[in-house]
Image (cartoon, rainbow, N blue to C red):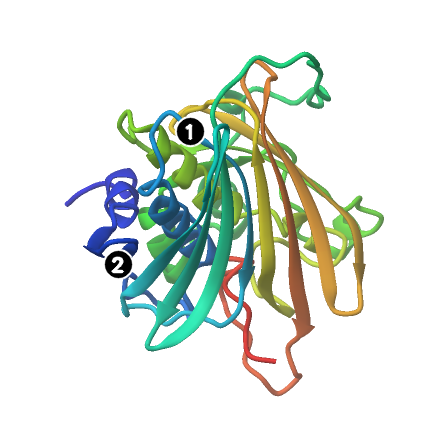
Amino acid sequence: MTNPAERLVDLLDLEQIEVNIFRGASPQESLQRVFGGQVAGQALVAAGRTVESDRPVHSLHSYFLRPGSPGVPIVYQVERVRDGRSFTTRRVTAVQQGKTIFNLTASFHHPEEGSIEHQLPPHHVPHPDTLPKVADEIREHLGALPEALERMARRQPFDIRYVNRLRWTPEELKGADPRSAVWMRAVGPLGDDPLVHTCALTYASDMTLLDAVRIPVEPLWGMRGFDMASLDHAMWFHRPFRADEWFLYDQESPIAHGGRGLARGRIYDLEGRLLVSVVQEGLFRPYPAQQPRPEQPGRPSDPAPKN
């Protein structure tokens, strides 16, 4: 059996079925809808396959339009919007069962020397080797992982370690700032294709970003009080990186209001270099009292439910 990192590489290896048209697998899982990071990562692969390799992606902007169905292939249609001397633009539409579920616009830039250089430094945080894996931290609190979480942990392609210990009680949540930080890296090698690393990190960027919105309200793991869904997702890629090496994902939520929460993230490497900036808005709706709540957290940024 392949390990989760190899399965992630396979998931990002789209089948080209026509010029500018690609098909991606959608694993049959217990989730009610396809994980948004999967759709974003696959869409970026489709865009990148139509661009010269000397032009890495520098930004993407995307919207989740409908929930995707697990187990059903997704078709990605690429529009070659512009091929300029320095920049290339692609628009991707993800279609499943005849309906558009996601769209993405990505811009690619031929590397050049800059006349201005600066960045915000990361906060001082512990080294990832000194922190417990999130699954171990949950086991410590609960005594054992629930079966659903155990299955999720076995197929998780990223090692996730929270900088601050998880909060479990109302007392711990009270007064908590809407901030979260995690160290992450793929659980195994991802090969040497830069596009795979970029799209793998795009996948990972959707896993924990909305944590910052939830932290003042409820524990991040366990029974959820809210149905959550990503509405949009934007990324800016500043430097080359490898997604199978440690990166720090520093996340904050400047506002939550009107059923929506905004989250911002900065991704750094071990040397403190800023690699990627991320912004996402999520939809948060409380479960009705009579509706059974999921016993596992799920991924907070699955494609948006129908309104």
Q: Kindly indicate the quadrant of the structure image that contains residue 166.
A: top right
According to the image, label 1 marks what residue?
55
According to the image, label 2 marks what residue?
23
Closest to the camera, between mark 1 and mark 2, is: 1
Callout 2, which amino acid?
Answer: Arg
x, y percentage for residue 263?
A: 69, 48
x, y percentage for residue 101?
A: 45, 69
Secondary structure of the residue carrying tag 2 is: strand
Front-most of 44 and 285? 44
x, y percentage for residue 148?
A: 39, 61
For the residues labelled 1 and 2, say whether their Cβ atoms are less than 8 Å apart: no
Q: Is residue 307 left or right of residue 302?
A: right
Query: Around disc 2, counting alpha carbons within 10 Å, would you say few (fewer than 14), some (14 to 19), or many (20 or more)?
Result: many
Identify whether 205 is placed above or below 280: above
Taking the spot 23% from the left edge, 45% from the top edge, the residue there is 10
Q: Kindly indicate the quadrant of the structure image that contains residue 70.
A: bottom left
Q: In which quadrant of the rendered image does the N terminus lie?
A: top left
Query: Around disc 1, counting alpha carbons within 10 Å, would you say few (fewer than 14), some (14 to 19), or many (20 or more)?
Result: some
Sequence order check: which comes first, mark 1 or mark 2? 2
Q: In which quadrant of the rendered image does the C terminus lie?
A: bottom right
Question: Spatial distance from mark 1 to mark 2, Cα to Cα?
Answer: 23 Å
x, y percentage for residue 100?
A: 43, 71
Front-most of 21 and 163? 21
